[in-house]
Image: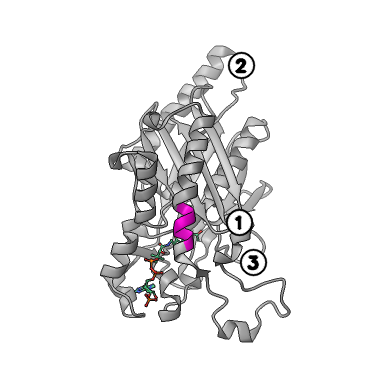
Amino acid sequence: MAISAVARQAEPFVLERAAGRRAEREKGTKAMTRSAILGVGSYVPSRVVTNDDLAKLMTTSDEWIFQRTGIKERRFIEHSGIGASDLAVPAAKAAMDEIDAIVFATLSPDFNFPGSGCLLGDKLGMAGKPALDVRNQCSGFLYGLSVADAWIRAGMYERVLVVGSEVHSTGIEFNDRGRDVAVLFGDGAGAVVIGRSRDDEHGLLSMCLHADGSAAKVLWLELPASAYVPRLPPEMMAEGRHYPRMNGKQVFRWATEKMPEVALEALGKANLNISDVDLFVPHQANMRINQLVAWRLEIPEEKVLHNIEKFGNTTAATIPMALDRAFKEDRIHAGSVVLFAAFGAGFTWAAGVVKF
Ligand code: ACO
């Protein structure tokens, strides 16, 4: 598949932008105290990998994967040499306006350093513009959004590109030892552009962030590690410690507890209730996690966005990819209240409320 088209979803943003600028002119004032999402785009590589494809590499089955996770297929990069910043280029171009700064959320940066934000800036011809990498895994996009929001509200920048992009397929162990993790992840990218809201009633109404490093080793990728000499000890690599390791049950338990908690916190901060939510866009780690979270929040199924079936868990890319899909499916309109919530390695968890 090529670049995720933005024709349909771009329209409300163009309108919002125009309305915002008109409101500023009419008021003769500049500052609004809120930021808003002004554009969105996404991109996935063309290579579709089904559960049956994975079953050829490890002892698993379409039935096992689908029943426990809701995943049917995912996308993988077509060949070696494509990094997170490469996937981000078409997503960013689809979302783009005139950009002053980049926030790049990823757990699979192209290289250990420099950050993928610098690489993306170069690929977009943005020499000299600041670029910041955020390393908060599945919560990375919401953490990045909070940084962009603060920059906009502080008047530091006018337009900030917030990207979530992941290439997982080059870092997964495709055998029985890694099968619990291998079946979950896919490659992809999503991006939004953040700028000033047209008024105080619309835009990013609240954002709540949390972390608890005591659970760091429940879901982690140990190597390469600056704590070890050498950073890639051969005996540890022989044990597969350069692949992600996870206690799935613990992740499941924490995610289904923390996501509802932080979602309610964000709604409370925005002075809203569950009944005010028009669309819930949770991180897509597991369909069963999201169903349980929605049930605990008493959000009806028709207000919950799922895209895990086709893309798996794309970590930091997931929420902007899902948002792009929501616009394509015409599920967000002027005035829609959208609730985001995420949980991931760290542990980290976050939620935000946006009124479009
Ligand atoms: N195919 C077939 N069998 C498998 C697979 C597989 N892919 N993976 C594990 N199994 C086996 C296990 O070995 C185990 O076998 P055993 O009973 O003989 O020991 C059996 O299936 C059951 O394993 P469990 O781990 O108990 O399965 P569970 O029902 O907990 O489901 C799952 C596993 C799907 C991973 C679930 O725990 C989950 O989704 N957890 C959340 C994970 C998650 O969201 N992680 C990403 C966070 S995102 C981030 O920040 C990076």
Query: Could you say where residue 242 lies in the image, as x and y percent from the top left?
Result: 57, 76
Q: Which numbered disc, 1 or 3, marks the residue closer to the eye? A: 1
Residue 131, above or below 223: above
Residue located farthest toward the left when viewing the structure as drawn: 63
Residue under label 3: 112
Please tell me whether mark 1 sits on a helix, a strand or a loop.
Answer: loop
Please tell me whether mark 2 sits on a helix, a strand or a loop.
Answer: loop
Tell me where residue 157 sits by quadrant.
Answer: top right
Query: Could you say where residue 58 lies in the image, as x and y percent from the top left?
Result: 36, 80
Badge 2 vs badge 1, beta-carbon distance below 8 Å? no
The CB of the residue at mark 3 lies under 8 Å from ligand 1: no
Question: Which stretch did the figure color magenta?
Answer: 250-255
Three-letter amino acid code at disc 2?
Answer: Thr
Residue 212, above or below 276: below
Tell me where residue 116 sits by quadrant.
Answer: bottom right
Three-letter amino acid code at disc 1?
Answer: Arg
Would residue 88 be visible to someone looking at this image? no
Residue under label 1: 135
Q: Residues within 10 Å of mark 3 (few under 14, many from 20)?
A: few
Prevailing secondary structure class for the magenta stretch in the rendered image: helix
Residue located farthest toward the top when viewing the structure as drawn: 27
Mark 1 vs 3, N-terminal side: 3
Query: Is 254 positioned to the left or the right of 306 in the image?
Result: right
> Which numbered tag is attached to residue 209?
none
Residue depicted at 62% across the width and 48% down the height: 126
Residue under label 2: 29
